[in-house]
Image (cartoon, grey):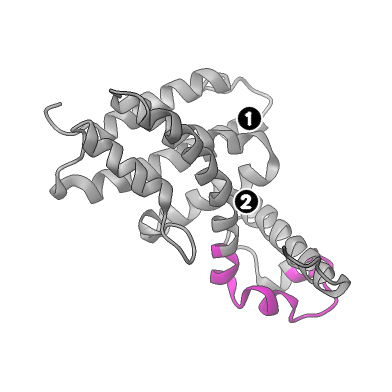
Amino acid sequence: MSQPLSKRAQASNQRRLQILVTAEQLFGERGIDAVSLNEINKAADQKNTSALHYHFGSKGGLLDAIVFEHYASVEQKINLALDTLEAQPTLTCRDIVAAMTSPYVDKLDDSRGINYLRIMAQQLSVSTDWVAKGRLGRDDVARERIVKLFRRENLALPADVTEIRMVLYTTLLFHSLAAYSRFEQTNRRNPLGDKAKFTENLIDSLVGVLVPPNV
């Protein structure tokens, strides 16, 4: 049984969370490159100028923490969906893609989730490193289960196109979600439709990316 945290540890965790949430907001609204670590520290009302460096080390460490914290909830939802899918005798590509995609769409439901989606879209605009990253410090269980399902249904992509298709899938997913969130901020009709219609069309588009050639 774990011991309750001391008041000092609780305060430290609260400061870390405050920095994390503040960074999410500033990165999501203004852009990663436009925001300095000193600005984040001040906006998070941290009197200790080294607080951000103490908790995260660098901007890269801060971004890792943001991404992996959000992915933890995404992976949990994916794994729950996969529990159901794995028990079914046959699946379509769309069944699997919907399980992969819907938890990310759920991130549109709150401001922190929206900022995460925008941060990921920014990151994927300059580097594809995040496509290969899984969980921090351990195996990406959801990703491994998804690969097994694609293989089980003879839907696995050929090796020579797998990397390209995964980059296409990931960039289409996050840029579409980020764009939807931006359109929702305006007073005009969202050209991507309501959330339900957008989700259906997004999943259909992602299926087209992941369906193997000649299937």
Q: Is residue 152 left or right of residue 103?
A: left
What amino acid does circle 1 point to?
Glu
Helix, strand or loop at label 1? It is: helix
Image quarter (top left, top right, bottom left or bottom right) of the C terminus: top left
- Say few, some or many: other residues with alpha carbon within 10 Å of mark 1 (under 14 / 14 to 19 / 20 or more): some
Residue behind mark 1: 184
The residue segment tinted magenta is: 41-64
What residue would you read off at disc 2?
28
> Is residue 22 something one can see in this rendering?
yes
Q: Identify the residue at the far right of this view.
A: 7
Whether 74 is among the magenta residues is: no
> What's the residue at 58%, 50% (across, down)?
70
Residue situated in front as seen by the camera: 92 or 26: 92
Query: Residue 184: x percent and y percent?
Result: 63, 30
136 lies above or below 108 = below
In the drawing, does residue 136 fall left or right of residue 90?
Answer: right
Q: Is residue 33 visible?
A: no
Compare residues 201 and 134 and report the one nearer the observer. 134
Magenta region includes residue 51: yes
Up/down of 89 relative to 3, above or below: above
Q: Position of residue 27 (x, y in %)?
A: 62, 56
- The residue most toward the front is 1
**Coordinates of residue 175 in the picture (x, y in percent):** 46, 41
Task: Check disc 2 and report its element: helix, strand or loop.
Answer: helix
Among the two numbered marks 2 and 1 on one chain, the one whose residue lies closer to the N terminus: 2
Q: Position of residue 97 (x, y in %)?
A: 37, 32
On the image, which quarter does residue 62 sit in?
Answer: bottom right
Determine whether 24 is above or below 211 in the image: below
208 vs 9, nearest the viewer: 9
User: In the image, what residue type sits under mark 2?
Assistant: Gly
| Left or right placement of residue 180 versus residue 142 in this view | right
